[in-house]
Image: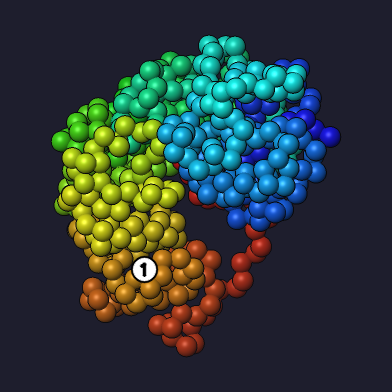
Amino acid sequence: MTDIVLTTLNARYAHASLGLRYLRANLGALRERSCIREFVIGQKSEEIVEKILAEQPRIVGIGVYIWNVEEATRLVAMLKAIAPEVIVVLGGPEVSYETNESRICGYADYVVTGWGDVTFAKLCAQLLGGDRPAAKIMPGEQPPLDQIVMPYGEYDDEDVSRRHIYVEASRGCPFKCEFCLSALDKTAWPFPLDAFLAQIESLWQRGVRQFKFVDRTFNLKVDTSLAILDFFLAKLDANPADPPFVHFELIPDHLPDKLKAGIMKFPAGTLQFEIGIQTFDPVTQARISRRQKNDVAEANIRWLHEHSQAHLHVDLIAGLPGEDVDSFAAGFDRLVRMGPHEIQFGILKRLRGAPIARHTLPHGLRFNPEPPYNILATDVIDFATMQRLSRFARYWDIVANSGRYPRTTLLLLGESPFAHFLALSDWLYAKTKQTHALAHERLVHLLHEHLVDARVLDRGEVEAAVLADYRDAGGRTRLAFEAPDSVLPSPRPRKAAGATPARQVEQPR
């Protein structure tokens, strides 16, 4: 029997919820009367409810996010139908704003908005003591970070051995980009550095080698950034055969020389930087309160590409208020020329509470009323064109971002990357009527057909590039355009269980 069950539905099994672990670590005397039970979107609600109720809880705390709110709503409705005596407490970004308009909140007993570390623990103490607050909405208390118990001891052995480990050296963000909920923060607050590094050391000693920092502004305070990099560099120097893999989110126009010097010390395969550009259009930047020195950001990305061995993942957003396709295409082409390893082609979403909503009427923003609240049209991009951009984003992910087709991608992009890839996207959709479940061999043949027949590129050059990419990605069968007597490679050895994927998969935000 467990009085408090903390649960959520993650996007994938490999993701471990940092939020749930903060809540449990800060329960104080109630911690031993609690447990964490995580599930994955796509699981049957009946099975999840059965497993939760098997713990015989009195309180169930559920983390609600944009990627799980639909299934979490079904879960809460079912849980209250079967066990109405169980008190359901919701928290998370999806229920922290516009709470009265959220269907899931109607089923719940209580909703903690904003920071839940302290408030959830106080609420549980009241409830288990027989005192039920009259107010349903509980605004989260924001304590100094040195008063929050760090959550890293709540990662269990299975998390350490099989899942991505999320950490944060700071919370909040000083910037006001209106598409992001962090625009509502007053600033960024750092955790005490020595205490944080002691926790990271503990995770390291337990065998953790992959660390995903969720800080919005890792390089805001460069001295802190360098101290964290030095921690991982010392581990690398001590045992080069057992290196870390560390993911950070960087501010693109803030890369002083001493930080560059630290980054240069890391070999390939150890650092990954997520860099938010979002738009290069100065008018759009001003409209959404985004401060960014574009020339400095470009110079820094080029420097990282040319002088570091970090993996670069750079974000752009289509559908921002007032930005048309031509402006977005110009920014996309500019970014491609900088040479990042991945470009995350995002479609604008209206997160609950995000200030982007103020542009709805002036710029004709029409959002999907259901999660993930993606933009469907604006005053300068109609619905049909937005659908084309959405398909572009999907095909870009499976072709360019997958890393399977580096030579083929160069041929696809040519001198006009956006225009050429949009043409491929339109052609692929016309041929297949699908954006998912395209088998590797089928996609290889489609890329070959497009380059030879639609783009009319040199057949020999195309076949050499496509075949080399196919073989490097593990393809072992004979392709349709190969000679019937060509020698096929031997089967690949099976990947060892638990091997680290080449491309890190992120929990959506």
User: In the rendered view of the protein, which quadrant contains the N terminus?
Assistant: top right
Q: Residue at x 25, y 41 (%)?
A: 360
Is residue 296 visible to the viewer in this orientation of the structure? no
Q: Give the residue number, with chain letter if any, for mark 1.
A: 465
Q: Secondary structure at mark 1?
A: helix
Percent coordinates x, y for residue 42 in the rendering: 60, 55
Left or right position of 284 against 33? left
The amino acid type of the residue labelled 1 equals Ala
- Of 309 and 119, which appears nearest the observer? 119
Left or right position of 497 against 281? right
Neighbor class of circle 1 (other Cα within 10 Å; few <14, some 14-19, many 20+) is some
Q: Residue at x 43, y 26 (%)?
A: 218
Query: Does residue 488 sit above or below 151 in this rendering?
Result: below
Percent coordinates x, y for residue 126 in the rendering: 69, 19
Percent coordinates x, y for residue 306 in the rendering: 32, 39
Left or right position of 62 against 316? right
Query: Does residue 121 sit above or below 409 in this rendering?
Result: above
- Of 371 and 431, which appears nearest the observer? 371
Residue located farthest toward the front when viewing the structure as drawn: 134
Q: Residue at x 26, y 79 (%)?
A: 453
Percent coordinates x, y for residue 252 in the rendering: 32, 31
Left or right position of 358 against 488? left
